[in-house]
Image: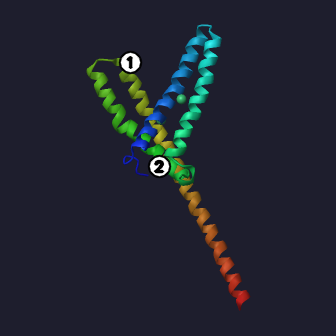
Amino acid sequence: MKHDSSITIQNLEAAFAGESMAYIKYMYFAKICRAQGDEETAKVFEDTAAQEVQHAFGHLDLLYPKDRMDAARCLDMAIAGETYEYTEMYPKFRHLAMQESNEAAVREFDEQIAESVEHAQRFQATLEKAAKRFAALAKVEERHANHYRATLAKVHG
Ligand SMILES: [Fe+2]
Ligand SMILES: [Fe+2]
């Protein structure tokens, strides 16, 4: 899918990012409020967060229409995202955090790099398993097709 060409697609990407961040932020705010004994405000944040998720899904429906997606494509995109995180994004952030002597951030980025590697590897392994499953399925389909053709040939004499 070529996304860069359309302003609306870019806006959907930005809106998706915003709604996703709102969800996480409100869940985090809810935790803060609950820890301070303010259950009512915590609930308002959680209820609103649940709606932000639906807004984010709505944007994804337009960005990645379900009829154009399958497990392999989802896994490919996930692997690309995680790989970008541990090869480009976090190493760059880590480098800059070192320059600013922000050791807490350096440690956090190191953890995230390790996690992103793990996530990418797990998605990769899942993709390979799925590919084998598709190949096996294709073989079964082929056998069925051959059987059907043979039967058809017999019927037609
Ligand atoms: Fe929203
Ligand atoms: Fe991840």
How crowded is the residue under tag 2: few (<14 C-alpha within 10 Å), some, or many (20+)? some
Q: Position of residue 70 (x, y in %)?
A: 55, 52
Residue 107's image quarter?
top left
Q: Tell me the residue at 43%/30% (across/down).
A: 112
Q: Tell me the residue at 51%/22% (across/down).
A: 25
Would you name the residue on which mark 2 appears?
Answer: 76
Residue sitting at the far left: 99
Residue 92's image quarter?
top left
How crowded is the residue under tag 1: few (<14 C-alpha within 10 Å), some, or many (20+)? few
151 vs 40, nearest the viewer = 40
Q: CA distance from mark 1 to mark 2?
A: 32 Å
Q: Position of residue 3 (x, y in %)?
A: 41, 47
Element assignment for label 1: helix
> Number of numbered discs present?
2
Residue sitting at the far bottom: 157
Tell whether circle 2 marks a residue whose Cβ is less than 8 angstroms from ligand 2. Answer: no
Q: Position of residue 67 (x, y in %)?
A: 57, 53
Q: Is residue 88 above or below residue 156?
A: above
Q: Amino acid at mark 2?
A: Asp
Tell which circle, 1 or 2, labels the residue nearer the N-terminal end.
2
Q: Tell me the residue at 39%/43% (across/down).
A: 7
Q: Quadrant of ligand 1?
A: top right
Would you name the residue on which mark 1 appears?
Answer: 104
The quadrant of the image that shows the C terminus is bottom right
Q: Nearer the viewer, mark 1 or mark 2?
A: 2
Residue sitting at the far top: 37
